Image (cartoon, rainbow, N blue to C red):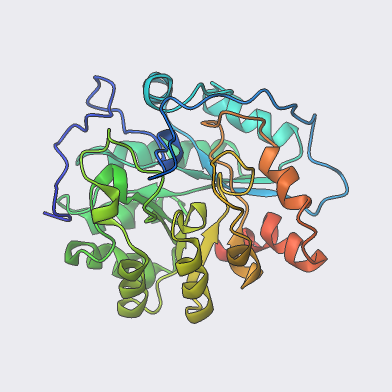
Amino acid sequence: MTPSPGACPEVSPESPGDDDVPVPCLASAPTWRDRGIRLPMPALADEEGPRVDPGLPPVVDAHVHLFPDRVFEAVWRWFDRYGWPIRYKLHTPDVLSFLLSRGVERVVALHYAHKPGMARALNAYMAEVVKAEPRVVGLGTVFPGEPGATDILEEAFALGLKGVKLHCHVQCFSPDAPELHAIYETCARAGKPLVMHAGREPASPQYPSDPYTLCAAERVERVLADHPSLKLCVPHLGADEFDAYARLLERHDTLWLDTTMTVGGYFPVPLPRQALEVRPERILYGTDFPNIPYAWDRELKALAGLKLAEDALAGVLGGNTLRLYGEG
C-alpha cells in the first residue's frame, strides 16, 4: 500500500526505539504553523477539580487513550522529548479509576497501530479492558493496507469493540487514498463509527510525512461523498481547518467532531466556536487523557463556561457520544 506521497517507514522515527510502540496522538507534538510554537511545550499548573461538577449533565469522555503498560511508558518518553510533560502518567487501570471515580460516567477508549501486524494484539487487549469494565466503549484499530485488514476489523467487532480508530499522521495515509475504501466499507456495513484523525494540526517535524500533504478537509469530504453510510468522527474539531469542518458539518449528516484539546486555550488559536454551534448535536466532548499537560477537567470547565443551550451542552458532554455508539 502507498497511502500517501511520503510513505512511513515500517518503524516510525517518533517511536522511541521500540518496534511495538505507536507514536502518540495528535496532541503529542503540536507545531502550529506560523505561530512560533516551540517543542517541547510547557505543562500548565492549573488547579484541577476533585470531580465533575454535580450541576453538569452526565459526562462521557469520547477521546481517551489506553495502551498496554510498555506502550504507555514509551509514549511518555516520546512526549518528554517532543511534546510536553504529561501530567498524568497512569496505566490503563489507573486511567479508568481516575476518571470514573471523579464522576465521568463513560469512557470511549482509543488506540492505533503504527505498523502492520500490531492491530490484532491491540484489539485483543482492548477487548479485555472492556470485559473488565463495562463503562468503557472500546474501539479497535487496523493498519491501513496490511494483509487481511477487513478480517482484522470484523474480528474486532466480534470481540465487542464498537468502532475503529485511525490516525493519518501516525499511519501515513491520506483520508481519500483508494486503499482505505475497504476499511470504510467494512465499518459502514457493520454500522460501526470510524474515528479518524484527519486534521492537519498539530503538525510535527518528527512525523515522517507532512500532515499538510496528507490531510485536508476536501479529502474528508470526498470520503463522506463516496461512503454516504459511513459514520465518521474527526477529532480536535478538525484542527486547524475549523471553519472548513464547520461547513462540512452543515452539509453532511454522517460527520461528527470531537473537542479534544481545542477549547481550553492551550494552543495559541482562537476558540473555534462556530464549529461548536453550527450543529451541536454532532459535537462530542473529548480530552486525550491521560496524555495532557494540564488539569483533567480544564476543557470540561471551558465547555461549561461557554453557556451553550442546556440541551446542546447535555449532548456535547455525553448524549451525542452515547447515541453515536448505540449506547444511549
Residue at 21% x, 44% y: name it.
Answer: 209
* Side (left or right) of 308 relative to 286: right
Would you say residue 181 is visible in this rendering?
A: yes
- Numbered disc total: 0
On screen, residue 307 above or below 117: below
Residue 283: name its quadrant.
Answer: bottom right
In the rendered image, the vertical position of residue 265 relative to residue 85, given as above or below? below
12 left or right of 166 in image: left
**Residue at horizontal 28 percent and vertical 35 percent from the top:** 205
- 241 shown above or below 40: below
The residue closer to the viewer here, 10 or 275, is: 275
Residue 216 locus on image (x, y percent):
33, 62
Viewport quadrant of the N terminus: bottom left
Query: Where is residue 252 shown, x and y percent of the image?
Result: 47, 78
Is 184 above or below relative to 6? Answer: below
Q: Is residue 3 left or right of residue 55?
A: left
- Left or right: 76 with respect to 45? left
What residue appears at the point 32 percent right and 58 percent down from the top-left corner?
A: 154
Q: Position of residue 123 (x, y in %)?
A: 37, 42
The quarter of the image holding the C terminus is bottom right
Q: Is residue 142 visible?
A: no
Q: Residue furthest right?
A: 55
Find residue 146 and report its horizontal and vertical position in percent: 17, 49
